[in-house]
């Protein structure tokens, strides 16, 4: 179909400001904007006509002083910038009723309603594996359920303890003593009528991950015996099968860390990070050993884990719903939240194209 | 060693990493690293001292620990080193009896984050707080849940709305069976499942210009506002003016439409700018920003504008978690919250960075006197 016969809608979350020479556009969901030089005084009124029912031709008839070709050029430019969205398929009524905010979130990343519909379908059906239901995993799980992801598998072998309740989501006093995966499954079923798959097992090797169907995304929130060990297992499995994965943070000794999203063959993998991080660590620790203390029990606080989990889940949602990779924030870097300055720092790592682990050929 | 006058029970703080240099035979450098605040402290000492450090278990008196070592240490010197390390916040006299008790991990955390106050006392201040929350939507309820998990035991919730099916998107206390029930009542039940000791007062009202605040907020330790109807600026000005006079802090949370992952504004009499300076500041800053938003008549949704505000629970959880880090630091008697006290941050979802705006007081303001 040619552009003039297509239908577009000006997205209601886009703020438009007109000055003498410029028109500024601001997507209030993403909080990003741009401006174009344009002195046509009727521009805002013109754009308001794109209401999802009129075609470009219909609007063009209302503005005879503008050529249709010129209008089509402007429309395509603003569609590419996600100011206008092409309305080529209606949204499903249940999605409009029950998850309008998800639709609106996704509209910032796509160019047509059919793309948004496909994205919602893809996300709802995606297979997600979360390893570890602790101070990060429990919050991430809840975030994914609430966005309508239907097929989630959780793997953990711990029971809910009273000392977990101050920092972990989804668990209540009545759950103390119950395996975490079972308590989470039951509480999600009760609140949302969604069935997640509970695997009461500790991940100890790559073989443990082959128990399930190949997931579309693996999120590692497990820190036992150590984050290095669990991340290595997840990385080995996911790089081998080209599965996107996220190295979570917010756990013991890495309370303020927000780990990276890894898209195999596209973004820096765990080993690309290690290559940069190991020399840094080694230089600092040359001729130094860490004091071994068997009596250590590290401190933790719920909302600090929550900050880490919220960013991890927000990134995971982009991956799950097929948002283009350029919109991901925590790739080729990891973030660290500073508890004194209340701000984030970033550690950036470029993908090593010679990396033996994530090379594409 | 039998008659050791100085015989404390000690442990290395759990939040401190300890590194020992291995290059020299008769002396070593021991470096203590506070993993949360990233501060470092180094001492030069005999290598055998590191073995003593590693053996500190927080249970046995020093004399008992030293018995298992074959070497002799000068008790006077030992005392001065240990007292120095306690003063520097590296060693502590253990305060928690049961390391697996409900809040032990949080108390541990506080010991490294709150200074000038024992971590038990800091935690007690959290427990004894009375928090009033206006608006228990996505962010307000998330703040309530986070604070209740942290131990806050007394709440008042003010909100007149009921749970709808659409609340499943962002309200963390949502339950399909409770659709149609008052949000304040459903949230109360949710908190009671988390902590049976919690005491919640529910007020099914909307904050209006004529609402009498005194009965709602006069006993509050602090007040949180997330009520964005008719407009969060208006409800905040009403609350802010009243609470300033009562010397009660107000936290206006972020995370609402067009600010889906923002940090909140903390108004503390004597410390921050006042609410009128803040709203004046933004009016002036945005004087030239007159945006138009188009809501189409063809909109197919009855409850929410398609194409309008987005947002997921993960995003409102960010604003709520960020708010609770600041609130808990304040409630526990810390001072880290002051670092961003009159600043507003917007977390940019596509970048993973916060963009900050410093809120300036009006010159010669006779309320906040900034």
Image: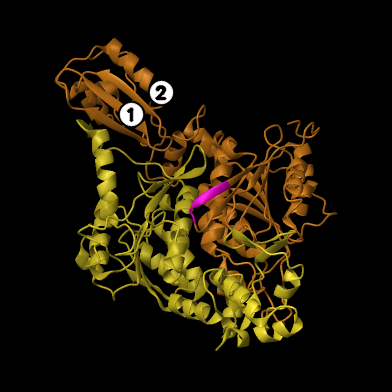
Chain colours: A yellow, B orange
Residue A61: x and y in percent read 73, 85
Magenta stretch: dominant SS? strand
Q: Report which residue position mark 2 lands on.
A: B88
Residue A121: % across, % down? 47, 80
Q: Nearer the viewer, mark 2 or mark 1?
A: 1
Nearest the camera: B96 or A208?
A208
* SS at badge 1: strand
Q: Are marks 2 and 1 in contact (CB under 8 Å)?
A: yes
Q: Which residue is mark 1?
A: B32
The residue lying at 57 percent from left, 43 percent from top is B326
**Residue B323 in the image, given as x and y percentages of width and height:** 58, 48
Callout 2: chain: B
Looking at the picture, does residue B165 appear above or below residue B269?
A: below
Residue A335 shown in magenta: no
The alpha-carbon separation of the residues under discs 2 and 1 comes to 10 Å
Q: Which residues are magenta?
A: B351-355
The C terminus of chain B lies in quadrant: top right
State the residue at coordinates (60%, 76%).
Answer: A73
Quadrant of residue A82 in the image?
Answer: bottom right
Left or right position of B140 against B11: right
- Whether residue B240 sits left or right of residue A69 in the image: it is right
């Amino acid at each position: 179909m040619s552009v003039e016969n297509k239908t577009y809608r000006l997205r209601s979350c886009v703020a438009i400001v007109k000055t003498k020479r410029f028109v500024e556009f601001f997507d209030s969901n993403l909080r990003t904007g741009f401006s174009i030089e344009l002195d046509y005084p009727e521009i805002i009124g013109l754009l308001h006509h794109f209401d999802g029912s009129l075609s470009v031709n219909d609007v063009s008839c209302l503005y005879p002083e503008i050529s249709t070709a010129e209008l089509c050029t402007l429309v395509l430019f603003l569609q590419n910038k996600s100011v206008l969205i092409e309305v080529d398929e209606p949204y499903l009524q249940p999605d409009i009723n029950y998850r309008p905010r998800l639709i609106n979130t996704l509209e910032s990343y796509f160019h047509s309603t059919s793309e948004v519909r496909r994205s919602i379908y893809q996300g709802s059906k995606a297979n997600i594996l979360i390893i570890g239901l602790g101070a990060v995993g429990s919050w991430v799980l809840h975030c994914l359920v609430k966005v309508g992801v239907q097929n989630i598998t959780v793997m953990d072998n711990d029971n809910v303890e009273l000392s977990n309740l101050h920092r972990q989501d989804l668990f209540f006093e009545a759950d103390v003593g119950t395996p975490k995966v079972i308590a989470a499954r039951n509480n999600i079923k009760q609140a949302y009528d969604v069935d997640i798959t509970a695997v009461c097992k500790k991940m100890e090797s790559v073989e443990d991950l082959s128990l399930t169907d190949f997931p579309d995304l693996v999120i590692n929130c497990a820190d036992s015996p150590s984050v290095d060990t669990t991340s290595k297992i997840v990385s080995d499995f996911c790089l081998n099968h080209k599965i996107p994965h996220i190295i979570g943070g917010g756990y013991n000794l890495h309370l303020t860390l927000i780990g990276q999203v890894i898209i195999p063959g596209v973004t820096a993998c765990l080993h690309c990070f290690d290559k940069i991080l190991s020399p840094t660590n080694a230089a600092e620790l040359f001729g130094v050993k860490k004091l071994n203390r068997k009596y250590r029990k590290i401190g933790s606080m719920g909302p600090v884990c929550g900050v880490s989990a919220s960013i991890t889940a927000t990134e995971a949602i982009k991956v799950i719903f097929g948002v283009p990779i350029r919109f991901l924030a925590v790739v080729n870097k990891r973030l660290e939240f500073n508890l004194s300055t209340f701000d984030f720092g970033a550690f950036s790592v470029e993908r090593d194209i010679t990396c033996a682990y994530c090379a594409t050929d | 060693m039998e008659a050791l006058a100085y015989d404390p029970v000690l442990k290395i703080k759990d939040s401190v990493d300890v590194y020992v240099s291995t290059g020299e035979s008769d002396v070593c450098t021991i470096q203590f690293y506070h993993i949360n605040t990233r501060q470092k402290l180094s001492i030069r000492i005999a290598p055998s001292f590191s073995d003593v450090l590693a053996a500190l278990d927080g249970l046995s008196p020093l004399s008992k620990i030293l018995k298992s070592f074959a070497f002799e240490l000068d008790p006077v010197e030992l005392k001065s080193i240990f007292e120095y390390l306690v003063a520097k916040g590296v060693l502590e006299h253990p305060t928690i009896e049961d390391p697996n008790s409900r809040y032990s991990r949080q108390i541990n955390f506080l010991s490294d984050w709150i200074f000038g106050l024992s971590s038990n006392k800091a935690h007690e201040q959290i427990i004894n707080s009375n928090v009033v929350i206006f608006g228990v939507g996505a962010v307000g309820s998330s703040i309530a849940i986070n604070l209740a998990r942290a131990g806050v035991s007394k709440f008042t919730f003010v909100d007149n709305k009921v749970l709808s099916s659409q609340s499943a998107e962002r309200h963390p206390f949502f339950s399909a069976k409770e659709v149609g029930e008052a949000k304040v009542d459903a949230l109360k039940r949710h908190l009671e499942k988390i902590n049976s000791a919690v005491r919640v007062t529910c007020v099914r009202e909307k904050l209006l210009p004529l609402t009498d605040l005194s009965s709602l907020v006069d006993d509050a330790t602090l007040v949180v506002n997330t009520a964005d109807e008719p407009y969060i600026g208006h409800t905040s000005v009403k609350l802010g003016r009243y609470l300033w006079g009562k010397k009660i802090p107000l936290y206006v949370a972020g995370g609402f439409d067009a600010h889906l992952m923002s940090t909140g504004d903390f108004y503390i009499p004597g410390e921050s700018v006042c609410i009128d300076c803040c709203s004046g500041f933004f009016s002036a800053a945005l004087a030239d920003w007159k945006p138009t938003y188009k809501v189409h008549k063809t909109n197919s949704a009855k409850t929410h504008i398609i194409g309008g505000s987005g947002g997921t629970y993960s995003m409102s959880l960010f604003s709520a978690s960020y708010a609770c880090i600041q609130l808990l630091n304040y409630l526990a008697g810390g001072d880290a919250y002051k670092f961003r006290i009159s600043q507003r941050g917007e977390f940019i979802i596509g970048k993973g960075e916060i963009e900050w705006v410093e809120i300036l007081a009006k010159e010669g303001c006779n309320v906040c006197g900034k």
